[in-house]
Image (cartoon, rainbow, N blue to C red):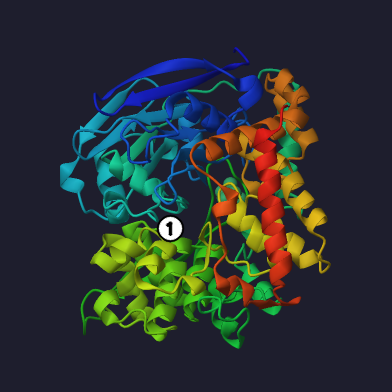
Amino acid sequence: MNEDLFRVLLVNLATGKGRVELIPGRSTAIGGSGLAALLFAAYGDPGRPWHDADQPFILAVGPLTGLFPLMSKTVSAFKSPYHNQYTESHAGGRSALALRFAGYDALVLQGRAVTLSCLNIGASHLELKEAGFMAGMNALAAGKVMRRMFKGNSGHRSMLRIGQSGEIGSAMACINVDTYRHFGRLGGGAVLGNKNIKGIVIQGDSTYPLPENKDYPVLFKKVHEMVTATDMLRKYHNLGTPANLESLNELQSLPWRNLQQTADSQIEGITGERFADDTLLRNGACSGCPVGCIHIGYVRERFEEKDNRYLYRQVAYDYEPIFAVGSMLGVTKAFDVLRILDILEKVCLDAMSAGVALAWATEATDRGFLSAKETLVPLKFGDAESYMTAAMHLGTGENEFYRVLGQGTLAAANSYGGADFACVLGQEMAGYATGEVFFAAQALGFRHSHLDTGGYSYDQEHKEKDVDAAVSFLLADEPDRCLLTSMVSCLFARSVYSKEMLAECLKVTGYPELASNLEVLGEKIRRHRWQMRFATGFNPDEITLPKRFYKVSTWKGPIDAAYLDTLKREYGRRIRQLVEKEV
Ligand code: SF4
């Protein structure tokens, strides 16, 4: 093994041919996020738009994938249809292990297939199969067809596919991964759609030798025990992240009805316990993860009116989707939440963006900016049936209004009015109305994600308004997260994978140089990612927060507008400094 080389499969979709390249850079890029930025720098063009056929779509895994528990994520990277800038989106399922067992650190798709196609790759095969008959097919149906088209060991095979939303270029289109996981945010589905790729099958059909030294099994056992025999990760298996609904509601930090409220007594219908008691069928897990945080409930559908036969479908749930199509839409019955999620799953829309966008459309209707002429169904907070129809319209781009809304809530507000109450923080907000620090953090964060930094937890622990302390916290939190996403660790395991533990893991798996450089590598990768982002047009000064965020009241009282503005300005200034400073 050469410690410094990445093994990357480059696929030219226009010709259907590929080649494997050995690319140096492991010692500075590690894998995952760092590798994706390195590959975008090599194969992307910051100046050309996201839909230029030559822009790459990248999947990358890390050096510990397949060797330690919860090293289960794949980083996708692309120029986003949402803001035309470089971004990442992360997913688990079987994708990471399949790529590793196919023998690759990364897959790079270049060009555009001549017709709608599915790509099938493995250790020694590459097949681009015409799939015009799949046009307009929803993501679940596409999965069924792909399983028949591409036989193989299902345990070692990962299936990525898009629904109608990706084919029409919606900036909220996600990529479904192995049914219950997603590259969710910032429009990766539209990038595949633009490349004429309906689905990707990754066959992990080779072997991956384990380290032969005696320290590896000892360390593996230690990590496995930390993950399974301690309380460190148990909460994610039990109620899972939906446990946060009740606690954030109590803290007056749960967005309700387009963030017109931050708490509501109707929370009982959508708590983590309610979902577990009434809807939970089973837990699932990403490959290589003994935790199993994926909660899978069910929806029931009658075959026909007056027919007593039912069809049951399994639908995964988490905190974020429940917030987005539950509290944010005033939908307070667990089964109704799952029925809306089931539609979003089929059309393959990011549930968070779709829910927040429909919440805006509902308030815009209440205020007279929109009517049923645009929305086709009358939107009303709490009306799950209408939201199911609207979710379908949004995913298929049923009319001009839904096509514009699919480009983002602010895009729609710019056309129809109502920008003041668009709940957008760089993209549609995540479910944390915790206060000024989170609002500034998501608005300016690299992925506009609640996972970029711990801004939401900082808000919950700090009442004082100290701009320097808050911004310093956000900046200090990011490099360690970059390390983890470069290793492709699930971020739920951040309490297990301290820098010291990561260094031990790297040492016993043959990466001593990486192990000794972790302190500086997180910072380097963070900087490189931001360089790519700035090169593609990011300007923190251009990001403004809609007025709604200044009207919110949390457990700390009303938002302090001056504090929020100063935080945002200072955070933006210091992010820019990171990119400009000499290192
Ligand atoms: S904890 Fe959940 S998301 Fe993380 S790797 Fe395990 S199953 Fe996947």
Residue furthest to the left: 133
Residue 315's quadrant in the figure? bottom left
Residue 292 in view, yes or no: no
Direction from residue 364 to residue 440 in the image, left or right: right
Please provide percent x and percent y for residue 35: 55, 29
Direction from residue 136 to residue 542 in the image, left or right: right
Please provide percent x and percent y for residue 509: 68, 23
Please provide percent x and percent y for residue 469: 82, 55
Q: Is residue 150 above or below residue 424?
A: above
Q: Residue at x 61, y 34 (%)?
A: 486
Query: Which quarter of the rendered picture does the C terminus lie within?
Result: top right
Direction from residue 107 to residue 547 in the image, left or right: right
Q: Residue at x 48, y 30 (%)?
A: 40
| Secondary element at tag 1 | loop
Mark 1 = which residue? 350
Direction from residue 270 to residue 127 in the image, left or right: left
